[in-house]
Image (spheres, grey):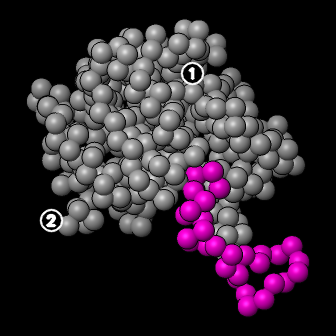
């Protein structure tokens, strides 16, 4: 069975509207909102085989398969999800949701503010990890899912999986927390702030209300993505892939592109600025910054995790310096302190933080083995 071609097939985005107001962690209230989501596989009669997959900063609901009108638009975790793959859709009913505040159809800054009749823009409130989880729980109610067999995610998605075990401990049996941390370090917050400043100071940002002016703060978003991309890669990977390779035979002695790594970063920045929303980027980085379950427990992580009841798989990657393995081990320690069942894997990988997205044999074997032990 060739796992690289075992696709879920054509994916179909769906939309759920919620007319019950929701008050967010920051105090703002949304009168109504919509979530865009996709599902793969079939929900069993007992409704016990559902798995929620939470996305990272620039991810979305499109986890696997492709679209009929866009066959090259493959889901961002297609190497992991599908028939015969580690998250096997012959066994599990998989749900992917675009977070509240996103730019892929869920209510966010690009949506119309009912109070003004114009796009929310910068008036859209900050959305936290807790807010994402709360809206996902409402979607689960809508789908008739009382409890998840598992909730999983990488990076910001891993934080959501962890938050699920704290906010809804009776509704989640397994949590897969991948390439995540119990809170950001000062250095991580600093990277996010520089990225935000690149956007906020772009002349085309217009205080976040650039939609009505028909412009995009592409320069700021481009710089933010370039900076972020540097932190997602490892030094070893950069050295192996680019080194000091030149674009031309000789140095140009100018400020144009000389090195392959410069060309790569510019390409990634331009590509990202062409499809992602700057206001959503600001919201997502703040969600990362604000995540801190131990904050209300005097920075005592074991005390914060005492509410959890799920079984856990925590995964880290050796060269991930933005969410380093020692941060995952903090989570493991806090869980073990509370007598919870925890499996931990530290994967040797040269790909840095992006490792959680890649088709690494050892990594996928760990996930496959864990999911095989998840009863439905």
Residue at the image point whose x is 39% and y is 44% from the top: 346
The residue identified by callout 1 is: 292
Residue at horizontal 62 percent and vertical 25 percent from the top? 290
Residue 4 versus residue 20: which sits nearer the camera?
4
Which residue lies under the disc numbered 2?
A: 1
Residue 231 is one of the magenta-drawn residues: yes
Residue 270 rendering spot, x and y as whole percentages: 68, 63
In the picture, the disc for residue 238 is none
Q: Is residue 186 above or below residue 316?
A: above
In this image, 339 relative to 282: left or right?
left
Q: Secondary structure at mark 1?
A: loop
Q: Residue furthest bottom?
A: 249
Mark 1 vs 2, N-terminal side: 2
- Start-end of magenta stretch: 230-259
Q: Nearer the viewer, residue 28 or 25?
A: 25
| Nearer the camera: disc 1 or disc 2 | 1
């Amino acid at each position: 069975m060739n796992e690289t071609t075992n696709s879920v097939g054509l994916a179909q985005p769906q939309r759920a509207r919620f007319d019950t107001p929701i008050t967010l962690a920051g105090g703002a209230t949304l009168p109504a909102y919509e979530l865009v989501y996709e599902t793969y596989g079939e929900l069993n009669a007992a409704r016990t085989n559902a798995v929620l997959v939470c996305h990272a900063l620039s991810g979305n609901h499109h986890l696997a398969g492709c679209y009929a009108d866009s066959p090259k638009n493959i889901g961002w975790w297609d190497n992991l999800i599908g028939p015969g793959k580690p998250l096997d859709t012959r066994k599990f009913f998989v749900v992917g949701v675009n977070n509240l505040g996103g730019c892929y159809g869920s209510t966010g800054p690009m949506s119309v503010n009912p109070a003004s009749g114009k796009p929310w823009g910068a008036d859209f409130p900050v959305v936290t990890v807790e807010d994402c989880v709360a809206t996902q729980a409402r979607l689960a109610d809508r789908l008739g899912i009382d409890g998840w067999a598992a909730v999983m995610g990488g990076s910001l998605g891993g934080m959501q999986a962890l938050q699920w075990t704290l906010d809804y401990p009776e509704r989640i049996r397994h949590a897969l927390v991948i390439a995540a941390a119990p809170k950001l370090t000062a250095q991580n917050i600093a990277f996010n702030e520089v990225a935000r400043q690149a956007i906020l100071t772009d002349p085309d940002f217009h205080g976040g209300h650039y939609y009505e002016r028909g412009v995009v703060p592409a320069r700021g978003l481009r710089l933010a993505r370039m900076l972020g991309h540097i932190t997602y890669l490892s030094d070893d990977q950069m050295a192996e892939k680019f080194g000091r390779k030149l674009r031309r035979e000789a140095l140009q002695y100018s400020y144009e592109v000389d090195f392959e790594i410069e060309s790569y970063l510019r390409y990634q920045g331009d590509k990202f600025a062409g499809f992602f929303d700057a206001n959503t980027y600001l919201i997502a980085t703040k969600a990362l910054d604000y995540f801190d379950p131990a904050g209300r427990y005097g920075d005592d992580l074991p005390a914060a995790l005492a509410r959890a009841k799920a079984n856990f798989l925590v995964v880290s990657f050796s060269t991930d310096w933005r969410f380093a393995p020692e941060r995952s081990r903090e989570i493991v320690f806090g869980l073990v302190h509370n007598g919870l069942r925890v499996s931990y894997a530290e994967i040797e990988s040269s790909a840095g933080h992006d490792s959680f997205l890649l088709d690494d044999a050892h990594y996928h074997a760990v996930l496959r083995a864990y999911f095989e032990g998840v009863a439905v």
